[in-house]
Amino acid sequence: MSDHALKINVSTIAGAVVIAPQGDVDLNASPMLKVELKRSAAAVPPPSRLIVDLSGVSYMDSSGLATLVEALQAARKGQHKLIVCGLQPRVRAIFDIAKLAMVFSITSTVEQALSA
């Protein structure tokens, strides 16, 4: 287990579920994030929005991005909002390169995501 092993904190704020991964989201860790995103989206009652706080993620590869795209598609089907916030520069660059910055709702902070 490396120092970059993923930990995921989940909390509920004002009807929104905040998923805050800490560590690298790579090929090894993205399945864990996928499970948590699905579990949170399937909660009863369903959340009004899922907020993915990436402020604790300094590295994300394409598998992490694919996990978020899948969660976004599921959110659209499930009638809830998926918002990504707290992107560090390296992670933001991946969103920009993949041209996903326009696809996702992205805010700077959890507070902004709650009111987005």
Image: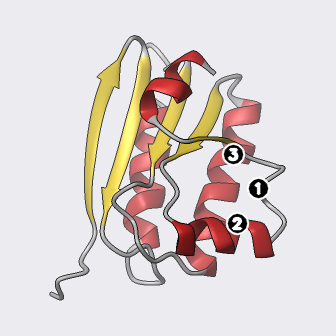
Density class for disc 3 (Cα within 10 Å; few <14, some 14-19, many ≥20) is many
User: In what element is the residue under mark 2?
Assistant: helix
Q: Is residue 1 above or below residue 95?
A: below
Residue at image x 34%, y 57%? 21
Foreground of the two, 92 or 17: 92
Circles 3, 1 touching at the beta carbon (< 8 Å): no
Q: CA distance from mark 3 to mark 2?
A: 14 Å
Residue 59 or residue 33, whichever sits in front: 59
Picture layout, residue 70 above or below residue 72: below
- Which one is in front, 53 or 90? 90
Residue matched to label 2: 95
Which residue is label 3 attached to? 72
Residue linked to disc 1 = 101
Specify whether 71 is left or right of 27: right
The residue shown at (54%, 28%) is 113
Where is residue 80, by image quadrant? top right
Element carrying mark 3:
helix
Q: Is residue 47 above or below residue 85?
A: above
Q: Could you tell me how many numbered marks the image carries? A: 3
Instruction: Report the side of 3 relative to 13 (left or right).
Output: left
Q: Are marks 1 and 2 in contact (CB under 8 Å)?
A: yes
First in sequence: mark 3 or mark 2? 3
Q: Amino acid at mark 2?
A: Phe
Q: How packed is label 2: few (under 14 Cα within 10 Å), some, or many (20 or more)?
A: some
Q: CA distance from mark 1 to mark 2?
A: 5 Å
Residue 111 point in image, percent of width and height = 44, 25
